[in-house]
Image: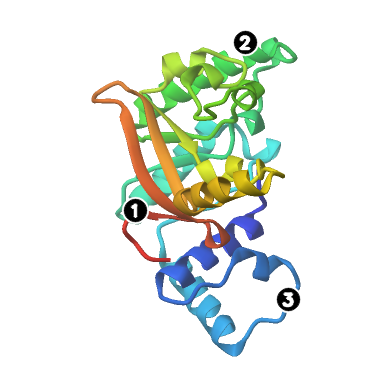
Amino acid sequence: EMSVDEVSLRLASMLAADAGLRVPYGLLTGGERLTPEQIEAIGRAQDVAHTLPLAIIQPRPYLGTIEGIIAFRRRRAEKEGRQLGLVVIDQLTQVWPPERYRGRKVDEIGEITASLKQTALRFGVPILLLHQLNRAVEGRSDRRPQLADLRDSGSLEQDADTVTLCYRPDYYLAREEPADPDAQITWRDAMREAEGRFELIIAKERMGATGVVTLRHDLPTGRILDEGVMI
């Protein structure tokens, strides 16, 4: 969903934070003046990013199909003595649907996920496909997402080897601040406990167990960290 420049800035923010100096992504896009230390940290992060075996591609019709793009990147990686290790697609709704199903959303998504599954098997490369949830989760008291919340299609659950759902308790709690002063005490305690908490819900795992992995998020830099890591 983002441009190549936006993804590159997010990556720089992550790498700078990993190296010891947090430069929130918002500072890089909001027109604020950076300190000399922040400028230096981002410069070093961008240098590191250029050394990574990573290609960020903004799909365009003239680039051909996703399968064609993956085949091209795989051949290039092999020429450089590497293996194509992972393909990330952000996101499913940005994938061009087949002409025969254009306008029939459920059929479009089913055709796309089946095609991506075959592409992954053909090239022997895992594909991480991002997708949105429907609005049903907003109407429940427990907002943790479930498989049934995947938007528009059961084919996602059928075709995927693994389905992982993300949940941030503090996102919902922050929107539910009570007006009652006594209730606010309980709410603030809940916010402190939930702050930075990130749940990775393994809702489907074809080759293993399902469950929940508790991590931490550093939202300003876009990082997901082990639970015990200090931000």
Q: Residues within 10 Å of mark 3 (few under 14, many from 20)?
A: few
Q: Residues within 10 Å of mark 2 (few under 14, many from 20)?
A: some
Q: Earlier in the sequence, mark 3 or mark 2?
A: 3
Tell which residue pokes out farthest to the front in this image: 182
Q: Which residue is mark 3?
A: 32
Q: In the visual, does 46 lie left or right of 62? A: left
x 46%, y 67%: residue: 15
Q: Tag 2, which secondary structure?
A: helix
Count the marks: 3
Of tags 1 and 2, the one toward the viewer is 1
- Of 192 and 49, the residue lying toward us: 192
Q: Which mark is residue 227?
A: 1
x 65%, y 81%: residue: 34
Separation of disc 3 and disc 2 at Cα?
A: 45 Å
Residues marked 3 and 2 touching at CB (< 8 Å)? no
Tell which residue pokes out farthest to the bottom in this image: 36
Q: Tag 3, which secondary structure?
A: loop
Q: Which mark is residue 31?
A: none
Q: In the visual, does 161 lie left or right of 194? A: left
x 59%, y 67%: residue: 24
Q: Which residue is mark 2?
A: 107
